[in-house]
Amino acid sequence: MAKYLLLKHYRGGPQRMPDGDVPMDRWTPEEISAHMGFMDHVADTLRERGEFVEGQALSPDGTFVRFDGEGRPPVTDGPFAETKDLVAGWMVIDVDSEERAHEAAAFLSSAPGPGGRPIREWIEVRAFLEAPPTVTE
Amino acid sequence: MNEQLRELGPLVLGVLVRRGADFAAAEDAVQEALLEAVRRWSDDPPEDPFGWLVTVAWRKFLDTVRSDSARRAREERVVEEPAPGPSEQGDDTLLLLFLCSHPSLTPASAVALTLRAVGGLTTRQVAEAYLVPEATMAQRISRAKRTVGEHRLDRPGDLRDVLKVLYLIFNEGYGGEVDLAAEAVRLTRQLAASSDEPEVSGLLALMLLHHARRAARWAEDGSLVPLAEQDRSLWDTALVAEGVEVLQAALARDRLGEYQAQAAIAALHCDAPSTGETDWTQVLEWYDELLRLTDSPVVALNRAVAVGEADGPLAGLRALELVPASVPRRTAVAAWLHERAGDLAVARTLYAEAAGQATSEAERHHLTRQAARLAAHAP
């Protein structure tokens, strides 16, 4: 029983997405509906299994902000070496094992895209740090 | 009244299940009976609350069975069930625990079902304790009930499964309004009262001895305090004494098992006025025993710590070589043994690496501080 964050990335992960380079605004409405329907199906399946914790989609526009010293304007965005990576959405699951978390992430990543082919989007899987167990030593 | 209902609910469920009721239907019937009790008892409390609940729950169960024609076959079976004998007041906790720890359930489901059906917690309380939404926990429990319903309990289950589930609950740390460690102790006490298996006492002793040290495991700022640095005056001596007593009675039965061996190690720690005065030779002997019983790599890791204390850090490092690299906390133990051996630069690197592998924030901060403490020895 451990919680994992599944992070959907807009632009990819370790390598470019093999089949997901076509931006969604160039998909047909049917392809978009099929994609959204699949995402709901993933969440429903996880709910039925008692594994779903929460999930949200995020706007593609993100701004990087940081403290830049007393009385100075915040530094926002850039410069970025290449493209800046943005998170499309996230889902939190609570599952029995890391293998199961990877399986759920792979399922999420098989969402259909243009032509109904799986877009094979990169999903980053991160374990939550939890309260330490009662027994350690 | 809620406290009383929480105690009675699981007992009533046990009676229904023993009478042959399908688990999921019985659980629903008990919940309905409990709701009715909440509505009616404040005005008109019954003389025999347990009997009242059994009667109402059984009636509700029969209503459901009768109203469902598809269940005709089962109704006949239930009607043919022999009338309950004098054992009606007996403790059915054991039966329920076996059902809820059924090996066909995932660990998460077994834990959730046990807390709900045997612990009498509400779904909301179980959900809060595990920090998941109530709807998620409700799904988990109803799936578990369906799975259990497919298996009619015709022979006693494996006690080891029950003990494993109870230990999982104990180990879960704590969140929400329910203290899971205390809940696990309570359930294990109940089980120990209705079983004469020494391993049940072994597990109870182990929990009591760990539980006794709980107040000393955390500093005021919430950081983790390792065993060696714990303020031993904070240990609950009454719980230690009880744990030791339970353990001694179990060991006297001369049927050693892994929980008894673990409890013996915990007792040796509790017995020492300081880490330095711990009887590490005896601790090591118990680890050898434990390793023989379980052959677990986690035990092998803990044994390496004991070897380090009993025979010095170099011997500890040699013992560590036999532990697979994938065992959690292996790197932290390696760091500590290297520090004791005087390889401070190696220890620093290993502490930092161990911090990256930690599964809790408190542990990660603790290990990061250890690495920072040796920062002057950066390679």
Image (cartoon, rainbow, N blue to C red):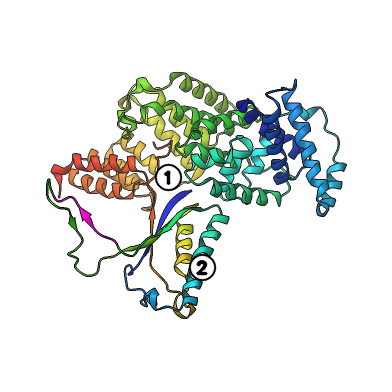
Give the secondary structure at mark 2. helix
* Residue B95 position (above or below residue A3): above
Q: Is residue B349 left or right of residue B78?
A: left
- Residue A98, picture quadrant: bottom left
Label 2 to label 1, Cα distance in Å? Answer: 41 Å
Q: Which mark is residue B19?
A: none
Where does the image place residue B185, in percent across and percent down from the top left?
Answer: 53, 30
What residue would you read off at disc 1? B298
Which portion, as a residue range, is magenta? A62-68
Query: Front-most of A29 and B255?
Result: A29
Q: Quadrant of residue B7?
A: top right
| Residue B112 inside the magenta-drawn segment | no
Kindly identify the amino acid type of the residue bearing the numbered disc 2: Phe
Q: Nearer the viewer, mark 2 or mark 1?
A: 2
Quadrant of residue A5 in the image?
Answer: bottom left
On the question of residue A1 being in view, the answer is yes
